[in-house]
Image: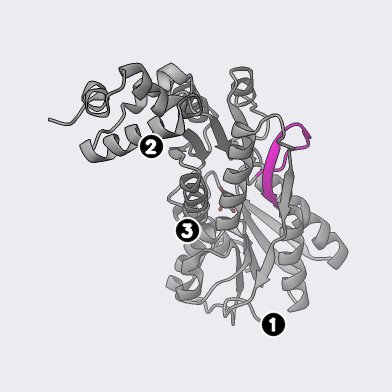
Amino acid sequence: MSANLRDVAKKAGVSVGTVSNVLNRPEVVSPKTLERVQKTIAELGFVPNGFARQLRSGYSRTIGLVVPDVANPFFTEVARGVEDAASKRNYAVFLCNSDESLEKENKYLSVLIQQQVRGVLITPADAQGHEYENLRERGISVALLDTETKNSSQCSVSVDDVRGGEIAIEHLLSLGHKDIAWVTGPETIPQIVDRTMGVTKAAKVGKAEISTIRVTLMNVAQGEAAAKKILLLKKMPSAIFCANDLLAFGVMRVLLDAGINIPEQVSLLGYDDISFGNSAAVPLSSISQPAYQLGVTAAELLISECEDSEEHAHQQVKFQPQLVMRASTASK
Ligand code: RIB
């Protein structure tokens, strides 16, 4: 049977209260006693009841991570960065997928409150829904991930998606493409709103004709559905820009199956530069986002706010996207 608090106290020759202090308030225990009790804990293999400690101390060494879909390799990378940074500070991470649903997001936020997490990193499902703001009233820190905040009293880590949309259209214009299909997602998604702003801005400057095909979810199946709509257009655009790489993979599959050559007949450009892009049937050109670094930076900012809230200075960090050219885009 595993050792308990009493076994440790007996073997170390101290009270149960002292063992509890070693676990919860080591700063009040003398170094000599601290060392003796910690040595006994290790010898007996005692594992403190985290939940009991959590109840007593009023918070847990956990943070919540709420993202749209961790099956999207972009968010897989982000989550890995979050977890690596959190574990360095002895925090565990509760991962929640909102599926771009405000209802599901709010359900998870309630669960995270019950779990007494110290803080929450969230990629909001909806630019308007701000349910996460009531976490702060409960003493739970919140930092926005992959979404910019205009609120200087909140941390955020994002990528300049307006610039990302611009870079994409500028690249296609530089290859001579003026008739471009823009396969994009719901306008409730902040990143989509910004990318569209960049697309519109660059298309106006370069006098490109943009035909928008809107999908409901940012995944491969929806990319395939978008490609089927494009095949029905009177005139095939000379280039297709997709709001993320998963959409681009879906478009690529359908076009290749329809016997359309990429990039000879149509150039295809994605967004995220996820790791599979390089090994796609036609290596995918994309607009890269530093997903892992986004996760690391967001977790570091959140935990700094949780632990040193007095000294903590809120930051709104914005990374820059970059064009990664591969075989799927070429001159018209
Ligand atoms: O969630 C949809 C998209 O937003 C992801 O593919 C990534 O680009 C994120 O910024």
Q: Earlier in the sequence, mark 3 or mark 2?
A: 2
Task: Answer few, some or many: residues within 10 Å of disc 1's Cα (few below 14, many 20 plus, some between 14 and 19).
Answer: some
Residue 224: which disc? 3
Evaluate if marks 1 and 3 touch, with contact meaning CB atoms under 8 Å apart.
no
Which one is nearer the viewer's eye here, 312 or 170?
312
Q: Main secondary structure of the magenta part?
A: loop
Residue 301 picture quarter? top right
Q: Which residue is mark 2?
A: 35
Q: Is residue 87 above or below residue 35?
A: below
Give coordinates of residue 106: x percent, y percent.
Answer: 52, 25
- Callout 3 crowding tier (Cα within 10 Å): few <14, some 14–19, many ≥20: many
Q: Is residue 227 visible?
A: no
Q: Which residues are magenta?
A: 147-159
Q: Are marks 2 and 1 in contact (CB under 8 Å)?
A: no
Q: Is residue 177 above or below residue 220?
A: below
Q: Position of residue 7 (x, y in %)?
A: 21, 25
Q: Earlier in the sequence, mark 1 or mark 3?
A: 3
At numbered mark 2, what does the secondary structure look like: helix, strand or loop? helix
Task: Give the Cα distance between marks 3 and 2.
Answer: 62 Å
Tag 1, which secondary structure?
A: loop
State the quadrant of the N terminus.
top left
Q: Nearer the viewer, mark 2 or mark 1?
A: 2
User: Which residue type does callout 3 highlight?
Assistant: Glu
Q: CA distance from mark 1 to mark 3?
A: 24 Å
Residue 184: mark: none
Q: Residue furthest left?
A: 1
Q: Residue at x 67, y 30 (%)?
A: 309
Taking the image as drawn, is residue 210 in sight? yes
